[in-house]
Image (spheres, coloured by chain):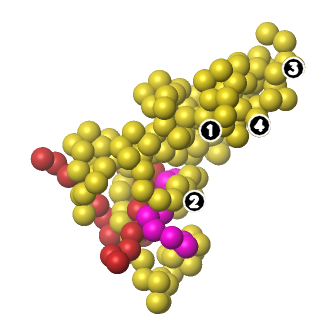
Amino acid sequence: MNTGPYSDPAVAEFINGNFVPVRTECFWERPTDLMRRFGIQWTPTFLVHGPDGKEHHRFVGYVPVDDLVAHLRLGRAKILYDTDRHGEAIPHFEAVLSNHPDAGAAPEAAFLRGVAGYKSGHDPKELRRAYDLLSSRYPQSEWARRAEPYSAIPL
Amino acid sequence: MLGIRWDTDFLAALGKARDAGRPVYQDFWFDG
């Protein structure tokens, strides 16, 4: 069960220390209730749920260690963000950016960090800073394009 | 080496998550 990225001791320690991990087997000929409930169409599919079972983050397909841990950190941040704990979410988004700057999840973390900053402090400069970060570090990402309207906010 | 301590029952995992105040990480896999 602990092959690929899961064989990395640091990954195991991170998952054991921050999540309740569960592996759910899929059967394409007779889809299970969980496959139907979460609309699983391909494997591997990875979900991060709040303790109430609600899905907050999903990624599909094999990911190497750095991307996997970045997605897990992002999922943890999105649980806080989605439940209006924007100030608490900020350090978790920043942890994605500082620990995994080259990961696929980083641009989304940068965007949502800006929004969480704005929503927690009502300072529109947080959105402009998110745009500046995205346009300089991740200019090819969709998240940079989504943040483009914030370029007009004065610093 | 300490490996990942996987659960295989989602509902049981949710119960542990509520008790521990932690999120659940669910890996849907296929033994093809």
In the image, residue A88 above or below residue B6: above
Which amino acid type is marked by label 1? Glu
Disc ID at residue A146: 4
SS at badge 1: helix
| Chain containing mark 4 | A
Which amino acid type is marked by label 4? Arg
For the residues labelled 1 and 4, say whether their Cβ atoms are less than 8 Å apart. Answer: no
In the shown orientation, is residue A2 left or right of residue B10? left
What residue is drawn where x is 39% and y is 39%? A66
User: Residue A62 location, x and y as percent?
Assistant: 42, 56
Of badges 4 and 2, nearer the viewer stands 4
SS at badge 4: helix
User: Which region is colored magenta?
Assistant: A40-52
Label 3 CA crowd tier, 10 Å (few <14, some 14–19, many 20+): few
In this rendering, does residue A85 appear at all? no
Mark 3 and mark 1 lie on one chain; the one further toward the N terminus is 1
SS at badge 3: helix
